[in-house]
Image: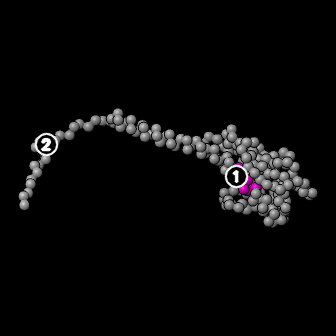
Amino acid sequence: MYATRFPSRRPTSPVTAAPCAAGFSLVELMVVIAVMAIAAAVVLPLVESSRGVGLPMAAQVMQRDLEWAQVEAQRRSEDVLVIVYPWNEQYGMWDITPSFAVLPHPYLQSDELTASGLVDLPVATGNDELDIVSADLDSGRYYFVYNAQGEPVRYLDSADTPIAGDRKIVLGLGDRRYSVIVRPIVGMVITRPGS
């Protein structure tokens, strides 16, 4: 067998390194700027669209809480008081028939509620704060009662006078509004954009 030897590719003279430049080349800077521009184009629309999610979600949470209060009144066959405090951004539900006691919230733990058992409206991220803009639950009052049949009625009314017309809680985030509406007689709770 014949063995073929390849010539050595080793340099015959020592190689000296070129002096390195202090900084980045123009091409490297342009590549970094292009990558950052693409990332910003993808991320910024996602951030902007997620800001408006807090308002409808807060309205749906309040809707579920009011529906739960209605079901509790029917299940216990006892009156349940619903109070909304727009100035504190809080609301709560109380069992008022045997004793004036806060109803245990269906999913919030006691350490997540205020000392008096109220639910704090969650605060949105960003510059805008989630607010209870207004609450008209019974002729300018901030409260009403679900009676044992689940009907929204006037509080402290022995005749269980039904509330006439829709009762509304308006939530706001910046200039946007969302309404939580309690229907008369059946007590159905709905949410919708706007005030």
Point 28% across, 35% down: residue: 21
**In the image, residue 153 above or below residue 174:** below
The x, y position of residue 71, in whole percent, is 78, 61
31 versus 5 height, above or below = above
Judge from the rendering whether residue 108 lies leftward or rightward of residue 78; answer left or right.
left
Q: What element carries label 1?
A: helix
| Quarter of the image where one finds residue 140 | top right
Q: Secondary structure of the magenta portion, mostly?
A: helix
Q: Which mark is residue 180?
A: none
Pointer 1: what residue?
A: 60
Quarter of the image with the N terminus in it: bottom left
Examine the rendering and report whether any part of residue 145 can be seen.
Answer: no
Q: Residues within 10 Å of mark 1 (few under 14, many from 20)?
A: some
Q: Earlier in the sequence, mark 1 or mark 2?
A: 2
**In the image, residue 188 lies at what x, y percent?**
79, 54
Q: Which residue carries the number 2 mark?
A: 14
Give the residues drawn in magenta, as a range: 59-66
Distance from Cα at disc 1 to Cα at disc 2: 76 Å
Q: Which amino acid does label 2 sit on?
A: Pro
Front-most of residues 118 and 63: 63
